[in-house]
Amino acid sequence: VSKVSLTVNGKDITADVEDRTLLVHFLRDVADLTATNVGCETTSCGACTVLLDGESVKSCTVLAAQADGREVTTLEGLASEAGEMSAVQKAFHENHGLQCGFCTPGFVMAITSLLKENPSPTEAEVRTGLEGNICRCTGYHNIVKAALAAASANKVEAGQ
Amino acid sequence: LLRHVTADDAGPILNPILFDGQRHGGIAQGAAQALVEEILYDADGNPLTSSLADYGAITAAELPSFELVTSETPTDLNPLGAKGIGEAGTIGATPAVHNAVIDAVSHLGVRHIDMPMTPERVWTAIQEAKKASAQ
């Protein structure tokens, strides 16, 4: 058992957890944040994608102990305190970027990270950038559309 | 896969957004069957594709955005005039993608490739066609 301290969505959380505890289980079971889903547990599907110090990681293959002292952002941390959704969340809503919704938190986090690295990606860059996330419902069509719409919305907001 | 066009007539459409969504998802599944997805067993019946690390699930990188053509002709066989659209895209996508690959290599003498048409299978089919034509 180790003591692990993380900042999750701006809130400090310290807990004693078994050494083998995965970050995704820490988020779901200790921090009680259940938007992050456990899909394949082999880093293949991307359902558990979160931001670790601002970069997307698959939280099913990161130990909670590896995230000690670091900052984690989950889907729950994207909206403003007043409840206003982020550009990516809004774009998913407006473009029907989901069907069953299981992969959605992972895709939203992966796109949030992708747009930070590349604010105006081409469709091909979005598709390659999302290779690590699997969706079985949407054929990716509206997810890609949402990512491109969020990129445009960010640009409008930045006055470009 | 560079371009995929689908035409559907499912009768009167109640929710166009969900209607298109069903088609998008279906096309991806149909194309995936033609190109990458397969559940494999060894000779003793042990599953070889037992996790997503072994199974070739299709991703956004292998697919284009889809082009949809829609018409609405009600059927007189039920009071709603509906024919259904659930995952309809799968039906046409598999043979369409399969035919496209065969068409691309038919000038080399390839007439058939088993699904899924992985790069290895396409390459093997081309080599065999070459050998056959050399004889």
Image (cartoon, grey):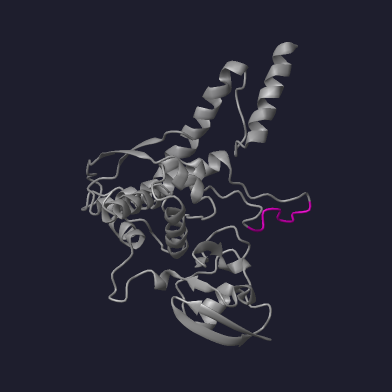
Q: Residue drawn at (42%, 61%), measured in percent from left and top? A: A108
Is B95 a magenta residue?
no
Figure quadrant of residue B33: top right
Prevailing secondary structure class for the magenta stretch in the rendered image:
loop
Q: How many marks?
A: 0
Relative to residue A116, is residue A77 depicted above or below?
A: below
With A18 as the anchor, is B36 left or right in this view? left
Q: Quadrant of the C terminus of chain B?
A: top right
Residue A138, x across and y down, in percent:
41, 52
Magenta stretch contains residue B46: yes
Nearest the viewer among A159 and A60 is: A159
| Quarter of the rendering containing residue B111 | top right
- Residue most extreme to the front: A159
Residue at the outermost right position: B44
Is there any visible trace of residue A32 in the rendered image? no
Q: Is residue B105 above or below residue B63?
A: above
In this rendering, is residue A24 above or below A120?
below
In the image, taking residue A115 as reference, residue A57 lies left or right, namely right
Q: In the image shown, does A149 or B81 lie closer to the viewer?
A: A149
Q: Position of residue A128 (x, y in %)?
A: 50, 46
- Can residue A82 be seen by looking at this rendering? yes
Q: Residue at x 62, y 37 (%)?
A: B118
- Residue A146: x, y in percent? 35, 53
Q: Residue B25, percent across and down?
A: 42, 49
Residue span colored magenta? B44-51
